[in-house]
Amino acid sequence: MRKSKIFLIGLLCICVAITALLFLGRSDEEQMSGPEVSVVEKPAPQDEILKIYFIPKNLGNLYFDALSSGFYDAIAELGEQNFDYKYIGPPVAEADNQIPFVEEAIRNGADAIFIAANSNEALNDIFDSAREAGTRIYIINQDIPGSETHRDAAIMPVNFDTIGAAQVKLLAEQIDYEGRFVILSATADAPDQNTWVELMKTELGNNPEYDKMELLEIVYGDDQPEKSAAEMETLLSKYPDLKGVIAPTTVGLASACKVIRAENLAGKVKITGLGLPSEMAEFVRDGTCEGFQLWNPPYEGYLGVYLVWEEKRNGFSPAPGSKFPAGKLGEYTILPSGQILTLENPMDYNQTNIEKYAVLF
Ligand code: RAM
């Protein structure tokens, strides 16, 4: 009786052991070939990892988050193990407060810094130091007019020469080519907005179509929502006959739309500019804004990663006239100016296409 009990217990133990072994065996097999478990890729040797920094004008601006998403898209395509990507920057856009972030990137041995500079010249010295240390300086989303010798290349969202005329025409169509209007810009030093505003002024001065339109004032909301809204409120009380606003900044445009809607002035004061579809969708839907323009911010980051990849991995040299492949965007050429145009012209966003783009950026 005792013996058979011991025998039965022994048998049970062997069965449990065999079942456990079978299970273990199967799970090992699944780990090797199962579809749910990703294969851990061998990391690239430390010295082959490309260190890329993106320094926006300021953090907390959804526009630059959209641009940053393009860096991630290209990095995912080329293999995350090959990159060390950092998106760092100051809380507010000021001429020289990006300097500590450039310094940090240099200290960490960055291969490339992409920067939407807050000034045309305040960063020249630190750019020189970075380049001496072997870090490529790419201006992104704009250029630094007058300081081009301090950077390696500039990734432009579009050809800036098209923006002044395009923005003025957009407002003119909305106010029937007649009336007083204002420009709500970003910071007074902003290289991109200042270039566009100058081009707008030239277009207004040179094109007789706009003879009945009068630019009253240019104000600066510093790409801060509260300051932009406060500037818009002041303009509305200062100019009761105001017909229109051009805000060539995503932060300024969305903030000004909020004020115009809150003051029940939609339709009376027409507003347009450069906006982010995801932020502008509500104002297009309710008629506060008939239409605005922009380009494709994620494409810029995407293109930037391919540029560094081609340089560091395939020996590409970004001399004027040379071409490089940028994944799904195709081939790009370095222009004589050292610029690369992501797209040629800005795109129009309005009721016909806003929903399509609002989910993208
Ligand atoms: C803001 C920034 C940026 C500009 C866009 C249109 O987000 O000022 O530099 O390109 O607007």
Image: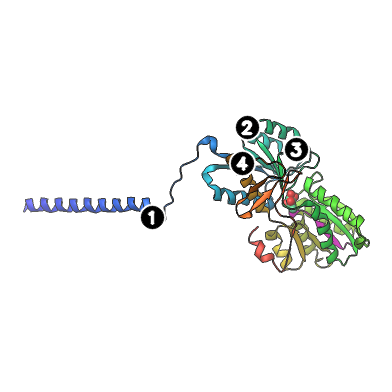
Question: Which label sits in the foreground, 4 or 2?
Answer: 4
Ranked by sequence position, the earlier of labels 3 and 4 is 4
Q: Earlier in the sequence, mark 1 or mark 4?
A: 1
Q: Residues in magenta?
A: 240-250
Q: Position of residue 209 (x, y in %)?
A: 91, 63
**Residue 321 higher or lower than 203, as above or below:** above
* Contact, mark 1 vs mark 4 (Cβ under 8 Å): no
> What quarter of the picture does the N terminus occupy?
bottom left
Instruction: Report if residue 231 is visible in the image.
Output: no
Frontmost of labels 3 and 4 is: 4
Residue 96: mark in rendering: 3
Numbered badge on residue 107: 2
Q: Local crowd at mark 1 within 10 Å, few (<14), some, or many (≥20)?
A: few
Mark 4 to mark 2: distance in Å?
13 Å
> Quarter-wise, where is residue 243 in the image?
bottom right
What's under tag 3, amino acid-wise? Answer: Asp
| Residue bearing mark 4 | 52
Quadrant assignment, res 290:
bottom right
The mark tally for this picture is 4
State the residue position of label 1. 34
Give the x, y percent position of residue 174: 83, 66
Q: Is residue 12 above or below residue 119?
A: below
SS at mark 1 in the image: loop
